[in-house]
Amino acid sequence: MTRPLDAVVVGSGPNGLAAAIAVARAGRSVRVYEADTSVGGSTRSAALTEPGFVHDVCSTVFALALVSPFLKTLPLAEHGLEFAHPDAPFAHPLDDGTAVVVERSVDATAESLGAVDARSYRGLMTPLVGASAELMQALLGPLGLRHPFLMASFGLTAIRSATGLAHSRFRTERARALVAGAAAHSAVPLEFSATSGYGLGLLIAAHAVGWPVARGGSQRVADALASYLRSLGGDIVLGERVSSLNQLPASRVVLCDVTPRQFLRLAGERVPTGYRQRLERYRYGPGVFKVDWALDAPVPWRAPGCERAGTLHLGGSMAEIADGERASWAGHVHDKPYVLVVQPTLFDSSRAPAGRHTLWAYCHVPHGCAVDRTDAIERQIERFAPGFRECIASRHVMPPSAMEQRNANLIGGDIAGGASDFAQIFARPIASFNPYATPLDGVYLCSSSTPPGIGVHGMCGYYAATTALRSL
């Protein structure tokens, strides 16, 4: 008889691959099943517009991959992964024709805020960046239990709302807009508790390691993880959709890189009623409406410094951004949405033909929204880059339904694996001392619907695998 596998992983997103690698590094046999014809989940690339243009389907910026306690231990450079670093991690243009540019240096960033808030920014960020390695190890842990004294100190600030932090620490609209743009990555109203923690985490990463892109496209991240897994003896089966746990081969444990709704479908009647009801109460957050462009020229940003940034946050003032994020959370579209823009070809020319560029942007929309937001997004870019539309050669549009079609984990266009409000930071997917384990013997969840949640860091998969390995 064929010996059962030690582990089977369903899904080849960064967390699924990280889980498989953790199992393989422990000397155990593992096989990954992926419904698509390529690995990657949200770290895929595709020719969405014209021949010769490489577009990232979802994730592009990999700050958390560089600070991940697990991913940074992997020899991914030996498997073809190379990062390209923008001159400045991100910028926030304003209506007065200037921009707040976040540099790798805390001091240089503080100076761009002006004399009034420079000292406050240094006082806030310098000690956090100095302790970035320990902070990220704790923040990317399952319950933030490492470095308790440091986390207690950080938590006093991180537990606040982004609006509360911005108005108490800063006096100018420039600094407050900077906080809003970073915190709005959470897709949670900025008045909610702990939204300052999202913004601070991203600012710490920007100063500590930068916000790089993968040279050649995000697919290179997934391909490097898969290559390393295979070098350890792991197996990957592509193009085979798992619709039920019953169709999997015999194995001692199963790790599912899926969200709660999909897990209930996979497990079917095997799920006890109580656990099923708790997973059914799990909440998904707002979706994203994403547009990719092939450009004949770089974006003509009005504010100096924007051309040096890999990522841009568009939306003007904190009040405007907060209003837009509140609207999408409440189920409404906003006339001037917060728009997140990434311009990778300024720093990675391999993604487009010579002299041409790729660009993508998304705005948050109500969960599953079917309203076309292309014009609203392009108007926001034109607001800060007059003449942008004249640079467009072609575009590709993905509403929430198309995002979910490309990656089944993006329920309703939610790229975070579930709403990231305060309650679901700690109860993800349920309140439990071991959120990765399920009532099914030997079956575990390892997606971003488990701690520490959203981001390409692989820690959800790593911690789930660590739990599963103990049972082996």
Image: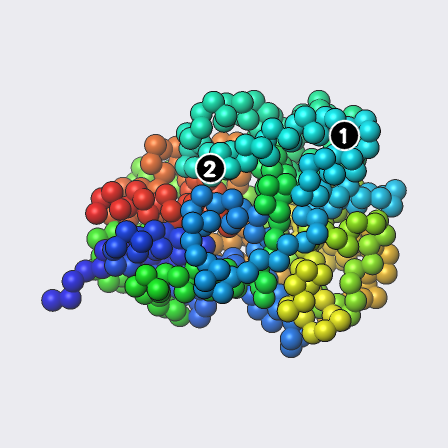
Image quarter hosting the N terminus = bottom left
In front of the other: 102 or 434: 102
User: Looking at the picture, how far across and down is residue 190, in whole percent?
Assistant: 65, 33
In front of the other: 377 or 50: 50
Q: As displayed, is residue 136 above or below residue 36?
A: above
> At label 2, which amino acid type do we have?
Gln
In front of the other: 463 or 324: 463
SS under mark 2: helix
Kindly identify which numbered label has been placed on residue 404.
Answer: none
What residue did someone put label 1 on?
118
Indicate which disc, 1 or 2, sits on the residue closer to the N terminus.
Answer: 1
x 39%, y 69%: residue: 238
What residue did someone put label 2 on?
137
User: Looking at the picture, how far across and down is residue 73, in whole percent?
Assistant: 43, 49
Picture quadrant where residue 124 is located: top right
Q: From this viewpoint, which residue is outermost toward the bottom?
A: 51
How many other residues sit within 10 Å of disc 2, few (<14), some (14-19) or many (≥20)? some
Image check: 283 left or right of 101?
left
Res. 219 visible in picture: yes
Q: CA distance from mark 1 to mark 2?
A: 28 Å
x 53%, y 41%: residue: 419
> At label 1, which amino acid type do we have?
Ala
